Image (cartoon, rainbow, N blue to C red):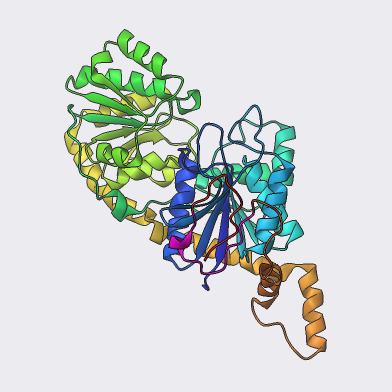
Amino acid sequence: MESLRIVLASDWYRPRTGGVETSIHNLARTLQKKGHEPIIVTHQYNNHPAREGLDSDDGVIVVRFRVPLRKDQDDVTTSLKAAALLHDFLKHNAVDIVHGHSLVSPFAHMAVHVGKALLGIPTLITHHSLLKEEINFRRKFILKFAARKADVVTAVSSVSAEDAEEILGRSVYVTHNCIPLQEWRGADPIFLEGDPVVLLVSRLLPRKNPLLAVRAFASLAKEAPGARMYVLGSGPLRGEMVELAGRLGVDRKLVMVGSVSHDTVKRYMASGDLLLLPSPKEAFPMAALEAQAYGVPVIGFKQTGVRDIVIDGVNGLLAESENDFVAKTVELGSDYSMRKAMSSEALRIAESFDCDAVYEREYSSAYKLALDSCTAEKRYLLYKLFRLLKADPVRPGEWCRERRDRYARVPPKRSGVPHIRRGARRAAIPVIGNEGNNRGYA
């Protein structure tokens, strides 16, 4: 595939932490490794300070717009200013594909609509969650309308794809989240007390169901008195977890580590014996994939995206109910030989979710489908007929490239929109402050 400039657009990106942010970052670095030019486009946040304008994240170009955010959600924008900035950026920066991330991200839908409807750029949008049981008819209609300009819809797991197909009424392809295995496997283990060492890596929110993990661990501690549980993450349920652990008599065996960096998570994963995923609504839990990279068996729910990673009884266990989750935690946590056998299988299965493998198997096909959509437009058919009458047939890809390059020669006029030449050196990204608009590269 030729080198493509691919814009990855979403309301959510680092320095926020979460599955969407991590998957976008991993995908961008993989695209760059494959010779493409990914550009992450997002906005600033009230509670997550980051530089406005051009920035670099591990060598990947990041563009952050300063736009009004919703009062009820300080990490989401529905501002028309965001749409205007996206229009100017996409129009003047020779973009080949617009890839929106998350069906519940207004910014992602803006990018897809502006790119396709106004500029004719091939588009994708990726579904990162499970929604069908939570949305009413009105919201379902809005999402279906919002996604109609996406040439291709993908989802991060088979469960998430089924969810999106039911909501949107169209075919959805699976493009799994991935992990750069060699980077994850390079961490040194941290010494942790406990036999076994049980891990919970999650934001402590009601939808993540962390209280179930405490109950499951308390049952395990009765069978394995030396067990310890380490909780990596923070959230509003932290106090309730500590209180529940006290009532169940395992408060001294529960270690609330709090929010930590990815590098620290790696060190804990390298030392863990078992990972609990108590959420019944996980589209594709990155923590499960990260645990597999270190050979840590996982316990999750059968109806979630965990089933794409964990083969029940091979590299982990899948529960059908909360009581079953507790029982399987006791079963696996108290059986060293079972954990050891599953650990080697986890290492093997993780190989198929390495970013290079996922790109070649799934993303390259999805991007080709999007590019092919450029020749399905009515305007293209008229153009093709015109060229045939002139005895000068349209060459493959010419229609897209001609429109892409037409405006890219002219810098955008709107303040705050950078102009990035094709093939710009990553190291040439300037430091952007609030002193003015820097429009591009040397």
Name the side, left or right, on which 36 lies relative to 90: left
- Relative depth, front residue between 311 and 381: 381
For the stretch drawn in magenta, the main secondary structure is: loop
Residue 147 visible in the current orientation: no
Residue 145 visible in the current orientation: yes
- Relative depth, front residue between 388 and 105: 105
Q: Residue at 37% x, 40% y: name it.
A: 288
The x, y position of residue 280, in whole percent, is 47, 30
Name the side, left or right, on which 374 lies relative to 197: right
- The answer to whether residue 210 is above or below residue 409 is above
- Relative depth, front residue between 305 and 403: 403
The x, y position of residue 240, in whole percent, is 41, 14
Magenta stretch contains residue 82: no
Name the side, left or right, on which 226 lies relative to 313: left
Name the side, left or right, on which 83 lies relative to 190: right
Residue 255 picture quarter: top left
- The answer to whether residue 61 is above or below residue 133 is below
Magenta stretch contains residue 423: yes
The x, y position of residue 232, in whole percent, is 34, 30
Farthest front residue in view: 435
Q: Which residues are magenta?
A: 417-430
Residue 320 picture quarter: top left
The x, y position of residue 158, in whole percent, is 51, 47
